[in-house]
Amino acid sequence: MTLDKNTNILIVGLGVIGGGYATALTRAGYTVKCITKNQRDIDYALSHGMIKEGTTEVTEQMLGEADLIICALYPQIFIDWIEENQALLKSGAIITDVTGVKGAVVDRVQSVLRSDLEFIAAHPMAGRESSGVEYSDPDVFRGANYIVTPTEKNSEGAIELCKGLGEILGFGHISVLSPSEHDKTVAFLSQLTHVIAVALMNCNTKEGLEKYTGDSFRDLTRIAKINDLMWSELFLLNREELLLQIDAFGAELNLFRELLADGDTDGMRQRMRNATERRALFDKKKN
Amino acid sequence: MTLDKNTNILIVGLGVIGGGYATALTRAGYTVKCITKNQRDIDYALSHGMIKEGTTEVTEQMLGEADLIICALYPQIFIDWIEENQALLKSGAIITDVTGVKGAVVDRVQSVLRSDLEFIAAHPMAGRESSGVEYSDPDVFRGANYIVTPTEKNSEGAIELCKGLGEILGFGHISVLSPSEHDKTVAFLSQLTHVIAVALMNCNTKEGLEKYTGDSFRDLTRIAKINDLMWSELFLLNREELLLQIDAFGAELNLFRELLADGDTDGMRQRMRNATERRALFDKKKN
């Protein structure tokens, strides 16, 4: 299968990511249909020209004609959805996802999937601190990273199709990692940062601090506005890796604390210069 | 003294903050002169219409005619500058500053200052991760917080003048704290955030991670591009408060780690909901 303007694309789950995908694909000239929980979200998407049609019911027709199914669901809901609905999918259909952990999801889905379907997992590294289709915005994908996480069960064709999807969506850098490498990487780059933001937001509850804050505190806590249902699930599905990352960060924090307690200016400045140099690598390249 | 268009304003130190002040004051119709270390910075400021005149030498005339002296210097350099140059200042002149710690600075300057001069301290809570006049931008002050930190040695007139300066510069919220309350507050809101960003940047040195990152990691490490000379000085001048804040954050981080290790979904979700609710207070209000 190749992705072209005749491909029937079905998005399952019209939230902040599913909505962004819908808009980006529709703008690129593809025909996008969708299944989601609330009629309100379908109405919103239709009135904003994001999708061609949508339904809150899983219909035989909608599933039976889809060539590419993009599941933008929370991990366990995604796994359940596949188990419940895969019987209705067209032979040869390709399924992809957007979930933030891969080890626990990819193994499970690939092991239960019909042999004439293929699941190729991917993770768009672009979220927003608010959830819901009305906050979706395909511009967050521009210049952002997109990670495809194939296993030995995937075909070259599906991997290429999934990378192609990332390009159509406008991602700036598309890469490939194994599910376990992916999970180690996001434990550090994404999950640890959310843990830090939440801890920072909670560790000083003095009233009125907002009158004195600067942008640094705002930046470090932007993601403390967090979808607690989704992130607690993601954390638990990647618990061992995330614990390792929290501990590595805690050790580095403690090392800096000791330099400060000892009045070791040179030691602190060296850590700061390391950080400055390394941070330059992470500047976003707009494409 | 009141701040009006006849006030002779002298900025000492034309860096990222001094430069922002110069531009904002010039745009507001005030006459701004400056003393700074490098002729290059004066040339830049003159060619960009930021100042009326500037010199790299401390001249009797420049100091003798100044009504308001804004020292935008690192803390120790500021203290030294006052000790070395106050003899040349006009009787009745008012001095203010921009330094990020107050306890160690205000006491010291007020105790050595000539009795016919007055030092009223202030801290603009708006910085940039790059230093130098060419990165200065008065727009960072819009909607930002400005803290005046008087002591019992200050007159009502000087406090009001300093608040008025904050308004002219375009700050969104101007408040008053004692030097010690200020130092507790910035230890949390500003210094701790820089320590966290540096530790996060240093705790995982694996190569190539920039290919997989999302915006959350970028946001939490923006300030890891840090002026090591200035921040190590600020940290040491506020060491005890900063150590307390690091420890409070470390305790909260560890609490969250234990919830995760125990698989306590409800506990994690509660911490996340607290953080989400509290973070809403800190959204920037553009004025």
Image: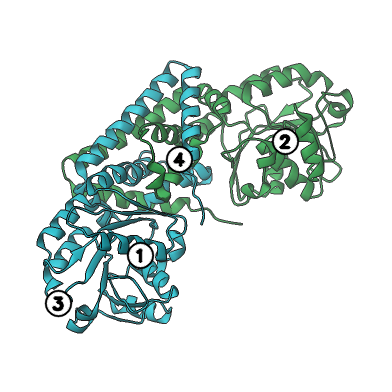
Chain colours: A cyan, B green
Q: Quick one: SS at disc 1? A: helix
Measured Cα–Cα span from mark 4 to mark 2 = 38 Å
Measured Cα–Cα span from mark 1 to mark 2 = 62 Å
Measured Cα–Cα span from mark 1 to mark 4 = 29 Å
In the picture of the structure, the residue carrying the numbered disc 1 is A165
Using a 10 Å C-alpha cutoff, classify the residue at mark 3 as few (fewer than 14 neighbours), some (14 to 19) or many (20 or more). some
Residue at 20% x, 58% y is A154
Q: Mark 4 lies on which chain?
A: B
Amino acid type at circle 4 is: Thr
Measured Cα–Cα span from mark 3 to mark 4 = 46 Å
Q: Mark 1 lies on which chain?
A: A
In the picture of the structure, the residue carrying the numbered disc 2 is B158
Question: Residue A88 — which label?
Answer: 3
- Counting labels gives 4
Q: Which chain carries label 3?
A: A
Q: Quick one: SS at disc 2? A: helix
Q: Answer whether residue B156 is visible to the viewer in this image.
A: yes
Badge 4 and badge 2 in a common chain: yes
Between circles 3 and 1, the one closer to the viewer is 1
In the picture of the structure, the residue carrying the numbered disc 4 is B221
Residue at 48% x, 23% y is A270
